[in-house]
Amino acid sequence: MSIAQERVSNDYSLAELMICAGSEAFKNDGEVLATGIGLIPRLAASLAMKTSNTDLMMTDSEAFLLSEPNPVGNRGDDYVQKNETWMGFSRIFDNVWSGKRHAMVGPTQIDQYGQANISALGGTYEQPKVQMLGVRGFPGNSISHANSFFVPSHNKRVFVDGECDMVASIGYNPARLPKGYSLDDVDIRLVITDLCVMDWNGPDHQLQLISLHPGITVEQVLENTGFDIHVPDSVGVTVAPTAEQLEVIRALDPHNLRSKQLKDNPPGDRS
């Protein structure tokens, strides 16, 4: 193993740990369109494209497919992005409807079924207490292709008891499946939070714990989740970033915008 691949002891932030953990969601996707909603998910997808899955596709968020991801933030007037081909809006939808896309999104609420909400909180649908974005692309995306979730603050306001206040995307709830769909058609992958990594491969598609971030306990995860999750007999620790991964992240985020994404920019190892 080269020096660049050796594990780093404590010299990484929680944001960087979550970027690396998030990149694992795209590792085995092959040639699909990756979409990361928000800075950390975008960097996670970009890291995967640069390291573990070079077949991954990514756009410049406008009209071109890129041969490598753009850095985030101000790139300067002399920066030339590496365009591979035109990728207009109609071609984006071709990818969406064909299932050749994987999005990492940030729901405001997630329930025990994996249903998500970005639309409205509290009250009634006609008169909610808090009006947010509306469902946007969540319904069509969630029935068409794979999705993963990014949660910067793992708490019971996000992982809610009961159903989401407004169900904006499909989950493993038999009562709400669209006509002609089965639970096997639902494809929710990883859940990356500031406490742990989870997936929906527990018994009967129950949310289950995969790994704990360094210094976090199972009890902390359970106390901050509003419903029961499956805890396997053996739960690992989220793997620390390699020096190579950190080097790629710094190149993708040269202005260190990642340090402003989580309150007080905590260290990756909180033990």
Image (cartoon, rainbow, N blue to C red):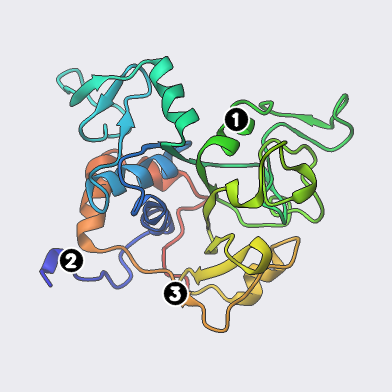
**Cβ–Cβ under 8 Å for marks 2 and 1:** no
Callout 2–callout 3 Cβ contact below 8 Å: no
Instruction: Estimate the x, y position of residue 131 in percent, counting from the top left.
Output: 76, 27
Q: Which residue is tagged 1? A: 140
Task: Name the residue located 77 percent from the left edge and 45 percent from the top edge.
Answer: 164
SS class of the residue under badge 3? strand
- In this view, 56 is above or below 59: below
Q: Residue at x 28, y 25 (%)?
A: 65
In this image, 34 relative to 249: left or right? right
Is 19 above or below relative to 39? Answer: below
The residue tagged with tag 1: helix, strand or loop?
A: helix
Q: Mark 1 or mark 3, which is nearer the start of the sequence? A: 1
Quadrant in which residue 117 is drawn: top right
Dot 2 alpha-carbon crowd within 10 angstroms: few under 14, some 14 to 19, many 20 or more: few
Give the answer, above or below, for where 62 lies relative to 129: above
From the viewer's perspective, is residue 230 above or below residue 224?
Answer: below
Res. 5 in view: yes
Closer-to-camera residue (188/256): 188
Residue 229 is left or right of residue 252, and the answer is right
Q: Nearer the viewer, mark 2 or mark 1?
A: 1
User: On the image, numbered disc 2 is attached to which residue?
Assistant: 5
- SS type, badge 2: helix
Work out which quarter of the rendered image holds the N terminus and state it: bottom left
Q: Quadrant of residue 60?
A: top left
Kindly tell me whether residue 206 is visible in this rendering: no
Q: CA distance from mark 2 to mark 1?
A: 40 Å
Q: Amino acid at mark 1?
A: Gly
Q: Amino acid at mark 3?
A: Val
Locate residue 222, reporting x and y percent.
68, 70
Real-space Cα separation, disc 3 to disc 1, in angstroms: 34 Å
Q: Closest to the observer: 245 or 66?
A: 66
**Marks 2 and 3, how far apart in space?**
19 Å
